Amino acid sequence: MTWPNDVADLEMPTRAVPPWRASDVCATLGIWIAAQVVGALLSLAVPDLDPGLLTILALALTSCGAVGGVALVGALRGIDWQRMGLLPVTREWVWHCCLLGLGLFVLRVILMYGLVSVAPVLESGADLLSEALVPEGTLARLAVMLLGSLAAPLSEELLFRGVFYNALRRRWSFWPAALVSSLVFGGFHLIPMQVIAAAVLGVALCWTYERSHSLWAPVVVHAVNNLIGFILTFAGLAILD
C-alpha cells in the first residue's frame, strides 16, 4: 500500500476554509481554558477527591469545554459541523491515518528518549503526568483511556486544527499556519517533553488535515497515537502486577 500522492487520489471533497476570525479563536480557547480552571478549582475545593476521579473529571471537563466552545461560537457565527471540517473520509484514508498514528508514536518515543539523553531536565514533570494518567482500578483506567484516546483527540482537533489552524490558514500558507498553531498546541501541554512531542504531532496533524480535507483524518491519527500509549502503559503495569 502506497501513500497517496494527491488528495484527488482518494476522491476527497474540496475543503473550504471556514471563516473563523481572531475573536473566534480567543473565544473558543477561552472557554476551553475556563473548563480547565474549573477542574483545578474543583481539586482545591475537594482536597480528598480520589486522584483517579479527579483525572477523569479533568479530562471530561476539558473535552466538553473544547467541543462546547467550538459548538457555541460556531452556532453564533453560522458555521455548522461540516463547514468546520467534519467531512467524511474514505476507508483508505482511515487505514493510512492508523499507520501514521502508529509511526508518530514510534517517532515520539525515539524523540523523547533522544532529547532526555541530551537534556535530562526536559523530563521534569513527566512523573506527575504519568501518575495522573494511570489511576488505581481497572474501571478508572478504562475511563481515562477512553477519554484520553477518543474525547481528547476529537475536542483538541476541533479546537486547534478546526478553529485555530483554519483561522491562520485563511491568511497564511500551510507552513506558517501549521507551525504557529502547532507551537501553541504544544505550549498548552506545559510539561517540557509533552510540549515538544505535541508540537511535532501538531504539524503532522495539520498536514493530514490539509491533505485529507477532513478533520476526521487527524482525529484518527491523534486517537491512534494516544491509544497505543495507553495500551502499552496499562499492559506493562498489568504484567508487573
Image: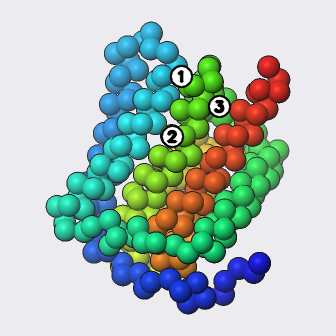
Are the two marked residues, 1 and 3, in contact with CB atoms closer than 8 angstroms?
Answer: no
Can you tell which quarter of the image residue 140 is in?
Answer: top right
Q: Which of marks 1 and 3 is nearer the N terminus?
A: 1
Q: Distance between the residues labelled 1 and 3?
A: 12 Å
For image coordinates 52% across by 59% down, the residue present is 219
Give the image location of residue 221, x and y in percent. 60, 60
For image coordinates 19% across by 68% down, the residue present is 78
Observer able to see residue 33: no
- The image quadrant where one finds the N terminus is bottom right
In the image, residue 145 sits, relative to residue 180, either above or below, namely: above
Q: Identify the residue position indicated by label 1 in the image.
A: 52
Determine whether the residue tagged by mark 3 lies in a helix, strand or loop.
helix
Are the two marked residues, 1 and 2, in contact with CB atoms closer than 8 angstroms?
Answer: no
Q: Residue 130: which numbered mark, if any?
A: 3
For image coordinates 41% across by 59% down, the residue present is 158
Q: What residue type is labelled 3?
A: Ser
Q: Distance between the residues labelled 3 and 2?
A: 15 Å
In the image, residue 59 sits, relative to residue 206, either above or below, namely: above
> Relative to residue 19, is residue 121 drawn left or right?
right
Determine whether the residue tagged by mark 1 lies in a helix, strand or loop.
helix
Observer able to see residue 150: yes
Badge 1: how crowded within 10 Å, few (<14), some, or many (20+)?
Answer: many
Can you tell which quarter of the image residue 85 is in?
Answer: bottom left
Q: What residue type is labelled 1?
A: Gly
Query: Residue placed farthest to the front in the image?
Result: 91
Q: Residue 147: which numbered mark, if any?
A: 2
Q: Which of marks 3 and 2 is nearer the N terminus?
A: 3
Q: Which of 105 and 140 is in front in this view?
A: 140
